[in-house]
Amino acid sequence: MTSDIFIGGGGPDYGVKQHLSLGYANRHGLVAGATGTGKTVTLQILAEGFSKAGVPVFLSDVKGDLSGLAKAGTETHKLHGPFTERATQIGFTDYIYEAFPVTFWDLLGEQGHPVRTTVSEMGPLLLARLLELTEAQEGILNIAFRLADEEGLPLLDLKDLQSLLVWIGENAKALSLRYGNVSSASIGAIQRRLLVLENQGGTGLFGEPALALSDLMRCDAQGRGEINILAADKLMASPGLYATFLLWLLSELFEELPEVGDPDKPKLVFFFDEAHLLFDDAPKALVDKVEQVARLIRSKGVGVYFITQNPADVPDDILGQLGNRIQHALRAFTAKDRKELRMAAETYRENPAFNTEEAIREVGVGEAVTSMLQRKGVPGIVERTLIRPPSSQLGPISKKERAEVMAASDMSGKYDAPVDRSSAYEILKKRAEDAAVEAAKAEEEAEEGSPQLREFNAARRYTGGRVARSTSRRGKTRQSQSLGGAVATAVIKELQGTTGRRIVRGILGGLFKGR
């Protein structure tokens, strides 16, 4: 196995080899550049390099082009001539065409193996971000999670969360005394946002069997790292779902992986394409979470690489953590563009051979300004680099070829069929059914008693409300309910209504393991 990854050729004639050191690959990185400047091909050759070095990769395929990693390039391709010429120019002497081990994943379950997590694992912070909730609505969500923990109600899928929200709405007054104001308007807003999430295809994200992180960190029989490709071309229609899922996955890696210090090579490299979607209109708490993960996940052996059009899309505190940088061309048509171009150039270690700002503006397609971490983590001098050609197919594979790769995968059959085990929805439904049986039994016993006993029971139930000519308001006789009894009553009412019938039909959701 090699100790570095060949990126391309730098120097005056592009003959000086530029490498990304595996020992510093977990110090994170950035691939930036305007549309059409070659970011996707750069992402492809980085994935190839990490895989050959035995490092598993997770990346999202926003345009559908990266599926070509599963198939070797061919000499009949129209770019075969330019590719071989470039390989010769940059000294890529061992350039060959080859395929790489690929596993396809898809949140929608259409172009890859299904990816699922549970409502509990997603947590209230990320779920609130996904649903675009206000602060008050996020507070209701936190109450729901607290009650689920206290009552042993696993929140696995959306119908679990929906049934619990129903009970919270029915008992809002009692809960307000303990948790603060529980408004029915906020609960209704959350329910509507859940409906929007369902319409966007997000229901399939929540359920079981849940994704095991170990399945993203595999190597094949030849020791090459598995390249996990998330189909994101359709997912980009729901950018909030895309960004929230990737942040959840990053957070899970941070929480579950052990500390490894500074390994010889990363345990996993995570590419976050269209990174601006993570930070657009994100609350400060979420940005702080990303910064924390970026700072600390390095010691877990995970390298994170952000792919975006402009470095300014990434907050400064996070941008400062990205030591390995590949900057494709930036266009400066406006005063704002020129300012951002100048700021991007100032982040590099200067090269006396050329002006960095001019180089970023002038590099062509497939060329970039690069700076990689060197010995002791010192940023390398910036170089104009001609990116090496890919060994795998440039462009997507066919649907038939994708299906064949999925069928041959070790993941085939493991996640395809959803599992709906007993969780909050089933527990609440069972409590409601038990309460209904007990109520019917008590009524039957009362009807079978003697006339004197029935008259006595009727008298005990008398409240004065039967007097038709009375104008006074009926006093409240209903005693405060325990959580179990209140849940039963609320769920019985809900199951009799339209929402209840929808829940019984199983329209909402399916999800993961409870904490």
Image (tube, helix red, strand yellow):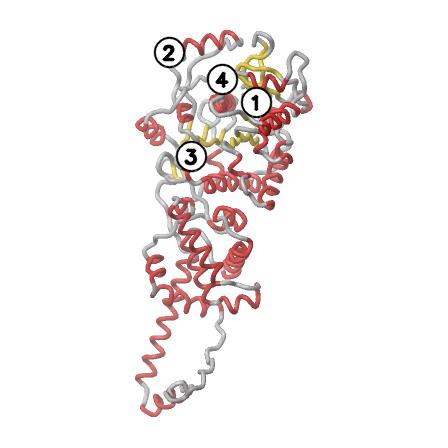
What residue sits right under mark 3 in the picture? 232
Residue at image x 37%, y 11%?
75
User: Which amino acid does the dot numbered 3 rest on?
Assistant: Ala
> Disc 3 vs disc 2: which is toward the camera?
3
Q: Is residue 232 above or below residue 469?
A: above
User: Which amino acid does the dot numbered 2 rest on?
Assistant: Glu
Residue at image x 65%, y 31%?
320
User: Which amino acid does the dot numbered 4 rest on?
Assistant: Val
> Disc 4 vs disc 1: which is toward the camera?
4
- Of residues 377 and 183, the one drawn nearer to the viewer in this rendering: 183
10 Å crowding of disc 1: few (<14), some (14-19), many (20+): many
Which image quadrant for residue 330? top right
What residue sits right under mark 4 in the picture? 365
- Of residues 161 and 351, the one drawn nearer to the viewer in this rendering: 351
- Of residues 493 and 351, the one drawn nearer to the viewer in this rendering: 351
What residue sits right under mark 1 in the picture? 326
